[in-house]
Image (spheres, rainbow, N blue to C red):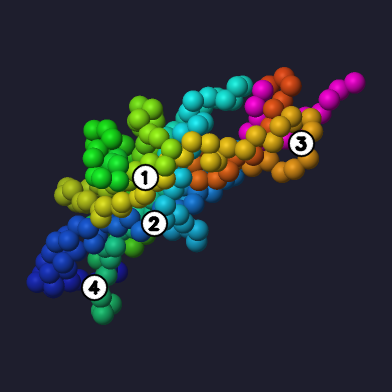
Amino acid sequence: MMARIPALVFAALLCGCVADNTQSLVITQNDVPEVSGNTCIAPAGESTTFRASGTLDISFFSGYSGYPGPSAGYLLFPAVKNNLSGSVAGTSITTNATMFTIEVNRVDVDLTDAGGASLTQPFSVPVYKVLEAGSVIGLAVDVVPAEVISSLYDGMLIFAKVKVVGNRDGSTIHSNTMQYPISVCDGCLFHDAGACVDFTGTGSANLCNIAQDEVAVCCEDSVDGLICPAVTETVSG
């Protein structure tokens, strides 16, 4: 049975939880995503591996022969925590946990250069996640729109300023703002290992988004063109 809370204590609890929204809903880190088969998965909670900064290789967007361009600019995988609690600290008093559930409904993004100038109009990415008291969820957000890529250049530093927005009991809650740095390069993540028929090494590529964070070791197939990650071509006959 749920313990009854004296009215004044309960009111103080609610005020303490809601007063500082940035402490109630918090982006804790940018997780390294998980890959299952060929599917990219945002970790369910805080991953043991995370990235404090990213790399975006714009050469992939100009197109390589036989290889399609990336479907996303830069994917961020923020871990988001609901810091609200369904109990009163230092007591055995518990409340209805659903009162402290946050429904996450969007991620606001402002993409700027190193000087703080916006590279595009601030935009929002719709999401829907139910975040129970004390729990952590993982999101996947494309923070670099396709139309921005052509304005980026080798050696540029950009920042994705990200804020998660949700709703709790009819009130809007905003998270802290994560300012995530992304270094832009032109070709630093692409490695052409030559003809696939001669390839004997190990191919690699970021299966979540080939244009970011990890070197792609590719090879040239005689029929299909560029293959990423590289695999040895079997010649019949």
Mark 2 secondary-structure assignment: strand
User: Amino acid under label 3?
Assistant: Phe
Of callouts 4 and 2, which one flags the residue occurring earlier in the amino acid sequence?
Answer: 2
Give the CA separation, mark 4 to mark 2: 27 Å
Is the residue under label 2 in contact with that under label 4 (CB below 8 Å)? no
Give the labeled residue for mark 1: 157
Residue hosting label 4: 88
Q: Which of marks 1 and 3 is nearer the N terminus?
A: 1
Q: Do the residues labelled 1 and 3 touch (CB within 8 Å)?
A: no
- List the residue tagged with mark 3: 199
What kind of element bears circle 4?
Answer: loop
Q: Against 99, is 54 above or below?
A: above
Query: Where in the figure is residue 29, as x and y percent of width and height?
Result: 39, 57
Give SS at disc 1: strand
Question: In this figure, which residue is indicated by the disc labeled 2?
Answer: 29
Q: Residue 208, can we see it? A: no
Residue nearer the viewer, 65 or 163 = 65
Provide the major secondary structure of the magenta segment: loop
